Image: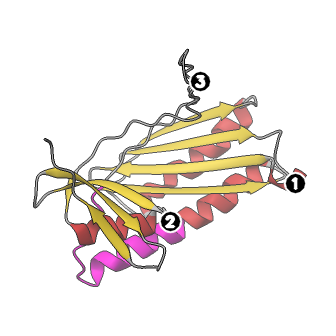
Amino acid sequence: MTHEVQVFGKNMEVTDNIHDYVSDKANNLDRYLKEIENTRVDLSYVKTARSAADRQVAQITVRGPRILLRTEERADDILAAFDTAMNKMKRQIERFIGKRKRGRRGDGRSAAEVAPSSVKENIEDDEITIARHKRFTVYPMLVEEAFEQMQLLEHDNFFIFYNGETDAINVLYRRRDGSYGLIEPEIA
């Protein structure tokens, strides 16, 4: 069963050869995990990178009904960056499947369906610049599942999720001492 594969380019032209190569390889991810519905591949050229070896960026985002996995790799060649990101994604999928098989509650419910876009908004009085705007769909999950998703997505500082126990949006965050905190907002 093939799933939807989207390939996007930023600051670069995605040729037919690159598009076909990326689509074929990304289409094979559902061999490892059947629940994959959508794979988004963002290929970009970052002119301002410090090293020339880090200018080509490949980001792969895999989504399913209860899954959100993402990898990003940089290299001096876009296909090398993509291949490295694919290998990293396969390892993430294997780790995800392993956690499920060990009987943990982390069944991979997705906390965020990320659709990044670059938006700059200027407000006349204060001149606030928003460098990146994200929209995401949240799925109910437990705190333990949110913690596992936070680790799988390699989010180091915080993770926003819909708490299925309290029916509210919560934020799981890492404290300075290495422990974790949970923000449970209340509407006044």
- Looking at the picture, does residue 142 appear above or below residue 131? below
Query: Which amino acid lies under the numbered mark 1 shown in the image of this protein?
Result: Ser
Residue 39 placement, left or right of 142: right
- Distance from disc 3 to disc 1, alpha carbons, whole Å, reads 31 Å
Q: In the image, which disc is placed on residue 13?
A: none
Q: Nearer the viewer, residue 154 or 60?
A: 154
- Find out whether residue 111 is within the magenta segment: no
In x, y percent, where is residue 88?
59, 66
Q: Quadrant of residue 141?
A: bottom left
Q: In the image, which disc is placed on residue 156?
A: 2
Q: Nearer the viewer, residue 54 or 93?
A: 54
- Residue sticking out furthest to the bottom: 102
Q: Earlier in the sequence, mark 3 or mark 1?
A: 1
Q: Earlier in the sequence, mark 1 or mark 2?
A: 1
- Distance from disc 3 to disc 2, alpha carbons, whole Å, reads 29 Å
Q: Residue at x 74, y 30 (%)?
A: 11
Query: Which amino acid lies under the numbered mark 3 shown in the image of this protein?
Result: Glu
The secondary element bearing badge 2 is classed as loop
- Looking at the picture, does residue 16 appear above or below residue 69? above
- Looking at the picture, does residue 28 appear above or below residue 138? below
- Residue sticking out furthest to the top: 124
| Boundaries of the magenta span | 90-110
Q: Nearer the viewer, mark 3 or mark 1?
A: 3
> Which residue corresponds to mark 3?
127
Q: Are marks 1 and 2 in contact (CB under 8 Å)?
A: no
